[in-house]
Amino acid sequence: MKSLIVSMMLALVNQSAVAESVVERGRYLIKISGCNDCHTKDYAPLGGKVAEAQWLLGDQVGFAGPWGVSYAGNLRLRAATMDWPQWQARIQAGGLPPMPWPSVQAMTSQDQQAIYAYLRELGPAGEEMPANRIPGQPIETPYILFVPQMPDATTTKAN
Ligand code: HEC
């Protein structure tokens, strides 16, 4: 009886250790795969010096290009409203640039799940980001223009 209780307790400890290491792996994957560069305001310009509590709340600076305007949304709000199958389906569906859809789709389902677990652990916070715009719609936020330019002789001159 005693050993049964001990082994049940060990199983519980093991389970929470596994859950913890999945979340930790998700945190690691987020850090190495650049998700914060777009989904966390000012992360790239500040060289990553943004408190973890502010991570992945989205950015209202749009990415404008031939696809219209896309916004790197609030992943914490999104993960909070989706169960794991819905999250996985969202990733498989893909979407607009410059979101690195092929990279996230190429992750193993364990890695995708670790990112999802980490987002759920961070919990919902912040606001919804603006909805994407189709080409030709007015843009009401700051945006980065993603349009290839032809080489221009004038840019090599000192101003
Ligand atoms: C270069 C900028 C950029 C990077 C880096 C980036 N994203 Fe995104 N992400 C976006 C944009 C823009 C969208 C909106 C695309 C769309 O609507 O189709 C988006 C959308 C998403 C969505 C869909 C959200 C929704 O509301 O439907 C998920 C999930 C997501 N990104 C996860 C990630 C993860 C995980 C990483 C890191 C591996 C990452 N993103 C890295 C720009 C980026």
Image: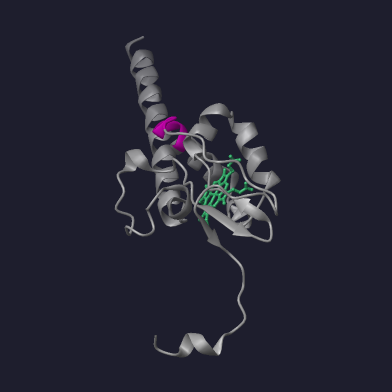
x and y percentages locating residue 148 in the rendered image: 62, 73
x and y percentages locating residue 50 in the rendered image: 31, 48
Magenta region includes residue 124: yes
Quarter-of-image position of residue 46 = bottom left
Residue at x 65%, y 47% (from the top left corner): 133
Q: Look at the image and tell me in which quarter the N terminus lies.
A: top left
Quarter-of-image position of residue 136 = bottom right
Q: Give the range drawn in magenta.
A: 119-125
Q: As displayed, is residue 41 above or below residue 57?
A: below
Residue at x 40%, y 45% (from the top left corner): 27
Count of marks placed on residues:
0
Q: As displayed, is residue 85 above or below residue 48?
A: above
Q: Which of 5 and 25 is in front in this view?
A: 25
x and y percentages locating residue 125 in the rendered image: 42, 31
Q: As displayed, is residue 43 above or below residue 14?
A: below
Residue at x 60%, y 41% (from the top left corner): 131
x and y percentages locating residue 109 in the rendered image: 59, 44
Question: How is this picture coloured?
Answer: one colour
Magenta region includes residue 3: no
Left or right of 12 on screen, residue 80: right
> Residue lying farthest top?
1
Q: Look at the image and tell me in which quarter the C terminus lies.
A: bottom left
